[in-house]
Image (spheres, grey):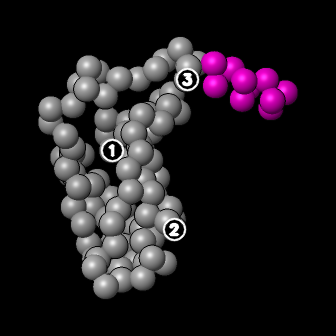
Amino acid sequence: NALAVNEDGVLMSAADDGTMSFWDYGTGHCFQTSSTVAQPGSLDAENGIFAAEFDLTGTRLITCEADKTIKIWKEDEHASEMTHPIDMAQWRKKCIAEAKRRF
């Protein structure tokens, strides 16, 4: 439903079910997934994200959601490669397999 990209090359995609995926724009690697929680009293169908945009600093994400809320998300300042490791070998294998299927 929504896409947003900041100047650091972080692309966020959002879906009808409230899931958010964060991608490296240059490589296409999905490095983080998350999901939103609907406002108490809302239906499960109101998890969707209709619009998203990064603020001018590129560090906060603003979402407009189906449960009639606007949420502001900030980055985890303490995240590092140690706390959020990326399995580059597995990602590379996945990319090669996908490329082989295309041709």
Residue 68 versus residue 30 in the image, above or below: below
- The amino acid type found where label 1 is placed reads Asn
Residue underneath mark 2: 16
Residue underneath mark 3: 91
Q: Between tags 1 and 2, which lies in front?
A: 2
Rounded to the nearest whole Å, what is the CA distance between mark 1 and mark 3? Answer: 23 Å
Secondary structure mainly formed by the magenta segment: helix
Residue underneath mark 1: 6
Residue contact at pointers 1 and 2, CB within 8 angstroms:
no
Asked which secondary structure carries label 3, the reply is: helix
**What residue do we see at 19% from left, 40% from top?**
76
Asked which secondary structure carries label 1, the reply is: loop
**What residue do we see at 21% from left, 61% from top?**
72
Residue contact at pointers 1 and 3, CB within 8 angstroms:
no
Residue range corresponding to the magenta coloring: 93-103
Of mark 1 and mark 3, the one earlier in the sequence is 1
Q: Between tags 1 and 3, which lies in front?
A: 3
Q: Residues within 10 Å of mark 2 (few under 14, many from 20)?
A: some
Q: Nearer the viewer, residue 27 or 73?
A: 73
Q: Residues within 10 Å of mark 3 (few under 14, many from 20)?
A: some
